[in-house]
Image (cartoon, rainbow, N blue to C red):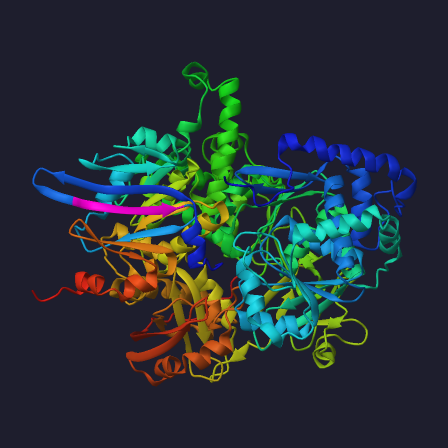
Amino acid sequence: MLRCQTAGKTVGFDNISDGHKGGEYQTMSSDKLEVRGAGLSNDALDTFPQYLLLNAKRFADRPAMRHKDFGIWQSWTWLQMHDEIRAFSLGLKKLGLKKGQKIALIGGNRPRLYWTFCAAQALGAVPVPIYSDSIAEEMEYVLEHAETIMAICQDQEQVDKVLSMGDKLKSLKTIIYDENRGMRDYEADNLISFVEVQKLGEELLAANAGEKWIKDINKAKGSDLAVMLYTSGTTGRPKGVMLSNDNMVKTAISANEFDKFDEKEQVVAYLPLAWVGDHVFSYGQAFASGYCVCCPESAETVDEDRREIAPTYFFAPPRVFENLLTAIMVRMDDAGNFKKKMFHYFLDHANKFGEKILNGDNVAFVDRLKYFAGELLVYGPLKNRMGFTNVKVAYTAGEAIGPEIFKFYRSLGLNLKQLYGQTEASVYISAQPDGEIRAETVGRPTPGVEIEIANSGEVMYRSPGVFVGYYKNDKSTKETKTKDGWVHTGDAGFIDDDGHLRIIDRAKDVGKLNDGSLFAPKYIENKLKFFPNVKEAVAFGDGHDFCGVIVNIDLTSVGNWAERNNISYASYQELAAHPQVYEMMEEHIEQVNRDLSQEEMMAGSQIARFLVLHKELDADDGELTRTLKVRRSFISERYAPLIEAIYDGSTQKYVDTEVIFEDGRKGNISATVEIRDVKKFAAATHKEAAE
Amino acid sequence: MSLKTVADIATGEELLHVDDISLSFGGVKAIQDISFDITKGEIRAIIGPNGAGKTSMLNVINGFYHPQVGTITFLGEERRKMRPYMAACQGISRTFQNVALFAGMSTLDNIMAGRSLKMHKNFFWQMFRYGPALNEEIEHRRAVEEIIDFLEIEPIRKTPVGQLPYGLQKRVELGRALAAEPSLLLLDEPMAGMNLEEKEDMSRFIIDVNQQFGTTIALIEHDMGVVMDLADRIVVLDYGKKIADGLPAQVQADQNVIDAYLGVAH
């Protein structure tokens, strides 16, 4: 009665039939499949579809992609994936997709969406991935601005969003959907399923369109547009960053060389498709080196799926590492006494010697032995639980990571490194080479990248990955990119004595207090966010007498604390306003002030007053970007009365805020928020060492 | 959803027919002379105030209660009474008003239990999970995974159901009922105690089951909004008697029904 909805996928034993097809293809292809640079893996090709042809030959039987479906990891070899992509690509051609036209991708990490990148590029068309959790209005802007001809949606939810825009999208002709669920009663005639498109492609293939397809792929140039990624942008409308084949391919190749990645790596693809990081790690680098990309079953099962796959290369924003650590600490609090003791004993040991051992420093034999025992009893099982057992290299980027968190993972023996990059650079600007790793820097320029610090303190770079321009926005392009190829990052930073880059804050956010002391909001916020109990913090102070912060508590962590201390609460709002929570936050902030007082440049900007916000900052309300970065200016407008209250000395303030739910409905939250003063510390008089 | 017309239902093939059913417990007359039919492919709602005999009616259909008077015709076969085992074998499965799952077992195992009637290999092979029993299990596991995918409960596949929130438990229970690949699915208050979002989800699943797999559904529900939206036809019971039977619009306009729900001065 229940039928498989995603027909055509291969499960274990079904592979035989596809294998046969592959064999047939191989025999006939020996003279027809022209691969440039075939056999010479070091020979750089120009485009990813060219790499597809190459990989289908050199790694024909190696896994290219996995997807957990029906509780089983279903795999495709490079040859099978090549066949799938070819069928879909020809289908798109039949539907009228031409060189230079745009196709939107809306959805999660599904093999078919990754295939769409390649299938579109094979025709010279430009894929435009869109954040799938955007509300319809944001999506509409991108679809319209990019003039997309087609859109491929993962499921009914996304199709509904696109259909709801109706006639407003003038250029959109066709909507393709991946999952059939709930789609049976849709009668719009511009709707077609992924499988049907592939069928169209197979018809073309039967009519000998395959040779032309390969010829077109080999004709493509490195300077052609490869992909267009819309930056979520902390201010204003998103901008379409145009990246060429050269940008992406060269970046992918040099990144693979930097960390010595080959076809044996495995990664789990779980970050948004529209984010440049995921595009490079889960698509670019995979195609260039031939490694295997694994798509999780659903967003909620990522942790479990990662454990099953045990990736060799892992990438995550600091948030993911923070959440993993919080989850472990919460679980350990509930563990038995013996386990708890053992855990803390060996963590202490790792804290002392783990990093040294990882860096290859001199460590006494006894301590090594003890570390080895810890590996067997604590570190190993911990890494296994988090899915890090086989990780060769893990990166964190996007935000500053807390030194404590960074050190924790490294002391367990996980080779966690920091990376600094942005969409306009095709990710890589700088990264930490093995053996030169410190929590507060983001490493050296990656191969091929030049970095300079402008007089204003802004970091500038030039590299082969530098973007072509913003789509239909010459003004912004000129503002960002100089004539000779230097790009403004918008970040303030400096190169330290070891030649490592250090980032302080967004250049435009760095300001001054009225007494003239330097004020770097992000620097203060990050210090606060490193406390597990603080989810988000927003600091104000530019042009004011003192620094004030708005704090967001972390519900998981504070909630658990409340449970253990018999503090009852009915809602986030009630917990946030609890006097004991306020005391906890006050302690944290005092600690931050103590730290700041030790730093010559920052001592003047200690926090004077704070409040705990009654609601969680949320991307749907526009308070965070889609990549979950704080939009400071928006928040200062939205909560203007609260900020005023911080500076006029009041001890409490009533606010009423409108919130938007994911489905577009609106509601209101109101509360009386308390504002408290915090102790400041005298600035350190003696100059300490740079550390 | 595709709109079924009245004509569709009228000409629909009859799946189940109850005739003049009466059921009493000692002096309490739970059901008195009730007759109605369920045609293939429809969603049939049974509604009524508390104590109207709705759950008793479902229990009669799947053989848990045996009526003193009346007959039940299922798939053309007329019986004095159903037996639960017989009902299950013939394709009637159900969910319960109070969740009745194995709390210590995982979601997967609970749904797998719903397929036990379809497992035919002998005890010996099953005990060792070897040979034909293993192949059989793989086959059933696939069917269960399709249900898990269908109900979107992948993240809780291995969680003991006792730890799950109520709304999810209800979903797992629906999954277990579906695992038997029923031709008639009896749902006893599938949305009781749920919030609006959970109700919307559950309604969507019920419609999907009905339309995608063509499963006939009889459901008891108190939320009138849900019933009017979901049901093709509605039977209304009050104090063990049938007081109305027809399309949602007809039932809504029926004076007897309005009186039963709002009360009437005697």
Residue shown at 81% from the left, 51% from the top = A204
Question: Position of A574 compared to A161: left or right?
Answer: left
Q: Position of residue A123 (x, y in %)?
A: 80, 58
Using the rendered image of the protein, determine whether residue A332 is visible from the camera's viewpoint.
no
Q: Position of residue A389 (x, y in %)?
A: 56, 37
In the depicted structure, whether residue B200 falls above or below residue A240? above
- In depth, the one of A375 and B196 nearer the eye is B196
For residue B232: magenta? no
Left of A628 or right of it: where is A79? right
Name, please, the residue furthest toward the right: A31
Picture coordinates of residue B177, whole percent (x, y): 38, 39
Name the residue: 43% across, 79% down. A638
Res. A287 visible in picture: yes
Q: What is the quadrant of the C terminus of chain A in the image?
A: bottom right
The vertical placement of A110 against A527, above or below, is above
The number of discs equals 0
**B194 and A273: which one is in front?**
B194
Residue in view at x 32 percent, y 37 percent: B73
Residue A552 location (% of width, % of height): 39, 66
Q: A219 left or right of B251?
A: right
- Magenta segment's dominant SS is strand
B119 to the left or right of A211: left
Q: Which residues are magenta?
A: B31-39
Q: Quadrant of residue A248?
A: bottom right
A212 or B90: nearer the eye?
Answer: B90
Q: Where is B222 relative to A468, above or below?
A: above
